[in-house]
Image (spheres, rainbow, N blue to C red):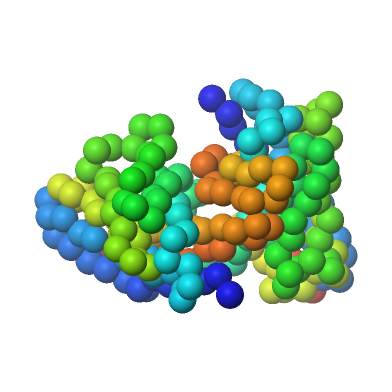
Amino acid sequence: QVQVQESGPGLVKSSETLSLTCTVSGGSISSSLHYWGWIRQSPGKGLEWIGSIYYSGKTYHNESLKSRVTISVDTSKSQFSLKLNFLTAADTAVYYCARHSGFVTGLLGPVDIWGQGTMVNVSS
Amino acid sequence: QLVVTQSPSASASLGASVKLTCTLSSGHNNYAIAWHQQRPARGPRFLMRLNSDGSHTKGDGIPERFSGSSSGADRYLTISSLQSEDEADYFCQTWTTGTLVFGGGTTLTVL
């Protein structure tokens, strides 16, 4: 079955850029019925959607983070990536990559596959 | 604005049933949601998609003890025959064009 796995640094410095990659296995990242998303969870808090990408490169972002977020996809490597710049302590969180339903029209859907998550600490 | 609201906590006894609620914001009564479970120190797991008519589609391997239902703007997750492993946070999630939205989660304690 389809699995997703995050990779990236566990510690980054304040004001710098976080770069994370998610590798998709067991299925095609080029599915026309799915988007690939990033979701984070600050310590002791709930889930916050960061943004999602379609295999064609079409992206959607949480408006509150949009100015600092870049999401890209490399279908040849079955990977998609997150860049979050101008980091602050508030960006310390577990970052999850995930698969969710969606159509080229932009109507999204439920997350049905989650990665294990990767903890990112932002240090001053 | 599309928002989903959950009570912060719930509790029920081992072997009993519990019904968790996720409420959609005004004007969004016909929206579907998804329920996700997050056990302590684990990543979330998709439980089911729940439609406004109460029909639901569960994820792979989700026990029959987990079921969903709907009434108006409320979406419910019922867990029967509670087991200790059901102690977890439960999040609801909804969506629209270009946006995913998560509820704040309900922490379920199994007594």
Q: Is residue B2 left or right of residue B11?
A: right
Q: Residue at x 39, y 59 (%)?
A: B89
B85 relative to A85 in the view: left or right: left
Image quarter (top left, top right, bottom left or bottom right) of the C terminus of chain A: bottom right
Picture layout, residue A111 above or below residue B61:
below
- Residue A71 position, x and y percent, is 80, 51
How far across and how far down the image is residue A23, in percent?
Answer: 71, 34
Asked whether A114 or B33 is in front, the reply is B33
Viewer can see residue B89: yes
Q: Could you tell me which residue is drawn at 35 percent across and 73 percent down?
A: B7
Q: Is residue B22 left or right of residue A7?
A: left
Residue B38 showing in the rendered view: no
Residue drawn at the location 81% of the way across and 61% of the way down: A69
Residue A50 location (% of width, % of height): 69, 60
For the point 69% across and 33% down, which residue is it?
A: A32
Q: B54 or A81, which lies in front?
A: B54
Q: Where is residue A35, by image quadrant?
A: top right
Locate the N terminus of chain A by quadrant.
top right
